[in-house]
Image (spheres, helix red, strand yellow):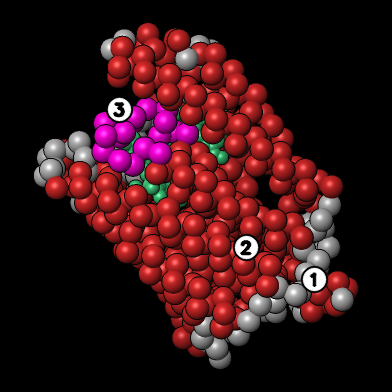
Amino acid sequence: MKFKSQKIAYYFFALSMLLLILQIVYGFIMGFAHMGYDVLHDFIPFNVAVTTHKNLLVVWLLSGFMGAAYYIIPDEADTELYSVPLALIQFVSFAIVGVVAVIGFHMHWWEGRKFLEIPRPLDWLVALNVILFLANILLTQIKGKKSSTTAWVLTMGLVFIALLYLPGMIYFENISVDSFLRWWVVHLWVEGVWELVMGGILSYLLIKLTGVDREVIEKWLYVIVGLTFLSGILGTGHHYYYTGGPNYWLMIGGIFSALEPVAFLGMTIFAVQMYRKGNKNHPNKLALFWTLSTAIVSFLGAGVLGLAHTLPAVNLYTHGTLVTAMHGHLAFWGAYASLVLAIISYSMPLMTGRKLFDTRNGNLAFWLSNIGMLCMTAAFGVAGVGQVYLERIVGLDFMVVAQELHVHFFVLILSATVFTVGILLYIIDFMKHGLPSEEALGTEESFEAVAG
Ligand code: HEM
Ligand code: HEM
Ligand SMILES: [Fe+2]
């Protein structure tokens, strides 16, 4: 850690970990409900659980992105953060909005747009909060002694995340129009501007961990940003096939979304190539594992499993089934959850001065969570294909099919248990690091010197 204000990242990371645990709890509630044990139905019915599960996911990832920005931007701009008190106020208000939203969902205080359920008054508070965050980041960049492509790609990703939140706040009577704009948020986030955040953070980590020249890494970053926008923007059309819009979306959505895996493949080749070119023996191997797994698993979850149901002729059958859940889990896990875990793994030893990288716990956490999530994906996939066949081809009723699928959720719960043990081990290591300390200033050099 170079600047003491980078420590603020810790609070965002800690919030992330707490919300991840809570998200998993709701995952289990739904997993058991799908197995026929909907025991909490009177208190937490399925619609409450699924809303809480998905929104907690979005909030813990955003908290992780904010922490990443507070850690990375001062380092890249070579200056202290513009204002630490402002960042603290922003942290506390962000956490309060999150908690109020979760409690509100249990009282059915929500808006009803999948993934963007938080009610309007809280939307405005989120907007205000994000303005505070962006102002702090932008002012740090402006006052900084240095300006890097990596930092600007990350910053612009975050600015666009905020701007793209706005279309989701406009209300339309017509459900087709409403849904049209909801996708500007949901799709253009994960298959557009979040990829900039991913590119920025991966590029920072690769510069630090591999020792490859910044110029080489940042040149790749341009290629990835180009590929992302080229395919991702019109790729939104893969959500407009059957929502009441014009027919031309079948063609546009089909062609451009089928190109999207190329951007994710670019990210994989980028990371693996830089790793192979690198000559720095960085001691934090775990951070490197998470960095590479982000690039590789995102290609599997988003690229390969996205492609699996993106053509109109396939999506006609798979739309809104567990096939979507199969893809949603591995894509979010590979691309964004692993990304947050990568930057945490990298920065925690540097913020606390504790060399807890490469522990047995840390390695087990990495493998168990990844293997667990791959098995969960398989369970959702098998259940999804069964559901498509029984419901969409044979024509059985939704609830009749749900009953037929109970057994697959037994496999899901087993896999999710392995995944959760991995996550718990990760969080134990996170806690063992303790709080960030100013004594850790300048640790980067000393850690690397140990590695030789
Ligand atoms: C122990 C862990 C978990 C379990 C048991 C679990 C289970 C579930 C279940 C049963 C659903 C509802 C599927 C449906 O009927 O529509 C769901 C939805 C979802 N979960 Fe999880 N989950 C877990 C962890 C995660 C994690 C770590 C992520 C992200 C990295 C995640 C992302 C999602 C998403 C995006 C959806 C919505 C899928 C859709 O749109 O169809 N879950 N989860
Ligand atoms: C990291 C990137 C990605 C993430 C996190 C992600 C996640 C998700 C989630 C959560 C959904 C359900 C959304 C909802 O119903 O509201 C979804 C839907 C979908 N995704 Fe992705 N996705 C990613 C990339 C991709 C890519 C690259 C493709 C195509 C190659 C793709 C194809 C699709 C399709 C076709 C649907 C609609 C499924 C349906 O009709 O139910 N996704 N994605
Ligand atoms: Fe999409």
Please provide the residue range marked out in magenta.
Answer: 308-326
Note whether residue 367 is visible: yes
Q: In this figure, which residue is indicated by the disc labeled 1?
A: 281
- Which is nearer the eye, 376 or 433? 376
Total labels drawn: 3
Tell me the kind of residue under disc 3: Tyr
Q: Residue at x 41, y 43 (%)?
A: 306
Task: Locate residue 269, reporting x and y percent.
Answer: 56, 62
Q: Is residue 257 left or right of residue 19?
A: left
Q: Mark 3 or 2 closer to N-term? A: 2
Magenta stretch: includes residue 128: no
Task: Locate residue 24, reporting x and y percent.
Answer: 58, 35
Report the predominant secondary structure element of the magenta stretch: helix
Magenta stretch: includes residue 314: yes
Q: CA gap, disc 3 to disc 2?
A: 36 Å
Q: Residue at x 82, y 56 (%)?
A: 358
